Amino acid sequence: MAEANEDEIKRALSAIKTPSGGDLISGGHVPGIAVMDGEVYFAIEIDPAGAKEFEPVRAAAEKAVKAIAGVKGVHATLTAHKRPGAGQPQMRPPQPMPQRGRGAGHDHQHGHQHTHAAPADNKLTGIEHVKKMVAVASGKGGVGKSTVAINLAVALSAKGLKVGLLDADIYGPSVPKLSGVKGKPKTSADSKKMLIPLEAHGLKLMSMGFLVAEETPMIWRGPMVQSALIQMMRDVEWGELDVLVIDMPPGTGDAALTLAQQTPVSGAVVVSTPQDIALIDARKAAAMFEKVHVPILGIVENMSYFVCPHCGERSDIFGHGGARDEALRRGVPFLGEVPLHAEIRAKSDDGEPVAGRGVNDPHAKAFAAIADGVVRGLEAADRPKPKLSIG
């Protein structure tokens, strides 16, 4: 079957009406289209204020293109660019919240933050034999956070580190698919009855996806989710690990706060795509970690650019450089760019992280560079702060 071409896709999109009464093509909402191995990628440019009303339009566009002969999959993203002269979005200062390791002395009613040290018996409880914990977060779904998390873990393992990967997304676990691992964890034979993680790609793995059937919905309220997360961390026989990578749930809700506040996370990696809508949520994730005193190891720009495999022309489908600019604005490292490439998607679907393909693979190189930045950040966080001596 012949692959769909750009003209066919544009004809399908020209039939999709926008809230203003025009259509996607004549209204100039689709700046570029990429087709590779039957996968279609395009962005729909909108005013940020109209994101909610454009979501049905995005869904209709995906459905229309999916109906074209030769199309295997469709990936449409809403993107918004700042108008000329518009400044950076203004963020309201976050309200005071309990600090990591604080006890009952925090005054929730009035929002006061005590500055005294936590009592010795109220320290954050780590995981036995796990030296470092790195959270990979995005603030929203759909930016490839889980793909970055597993490839970062594999890249760290390739450097000779002992690495584990915890899939902390209870509602939508991705690690079973991304790792190609099926089956349920066994329990240890001793009295502790700890879960024994599954293993693949040089990693120790734990996910809610290993514990329930793939199509079983997790209809749980917040407290149940928080309890499950803590159990998947502390009731697992991780063994000796240099790094435990945590694929964080999207957003900044209860589950993310539970992990950030109740465990000694060594640092966080924030994943975003280049467009402004994704960066808004990435800023929220970064702000959450700052509020709970988790160092930000850096920002990764995923789906950064697309290079046509036929002509070699580069297209910045979702814009480019937004994550780098955000890292500069926040004063944190920019860890690198990961391209939008069908091979990364295909290998992820097959449970074969591209980071394990060797130093000569260009995609593996991208994740190796990100892993280098993470290691540097962890080492810097360990170094004692210089003391200023006056007189």
Image (cartoon, grey):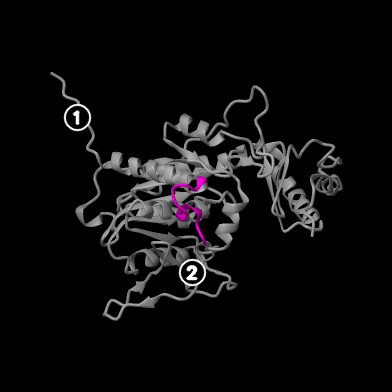
**Circles 1 and 2 in contact, beta carbons < 8 Å:** no
Name which residue type carries label 1.
Answer: Lys
The magenta segment is 352-362
Disc nearest the viewer among 1 and 2 = 2
**Residue marked by disc 1:** 387
Please tell me whether residue 227 is drawn above or below residue 48 in the rendered image: below
Q: Mark yes or no: residue 78 visible.
A: yes
Q: What separation in Å lies between label 1 and label 2 (alpha carbons)?
A: 49 Å
In the image as oriented, which residue stretches furthest toward the top? 391
Q: Residues within 10 Å of mark 2 (few under 14, many from 20)?
A: some
Q: Earlier in the sequence, mark 1 or mark 2?
A: 2
Residue 181's tag is 2
- Point out residue 314 in the picture as x, y percentages from the top left corner: 64, 36
**Magenta region, mostly helix, strand or loop?**
loop
- Left/right placement of residue 337 relative to residue 153 reads right
- Point out residue 50 in the picture as x, y percentages from the top left corner: 72, 41
- Point out residue 189 in the picture as x, y percentages from the top left corner: 29, 81
Relative to the observer, which residue lies in front, 225 or 246?
246
In the image as oriented, which residue stretches furthest toward the left? 391
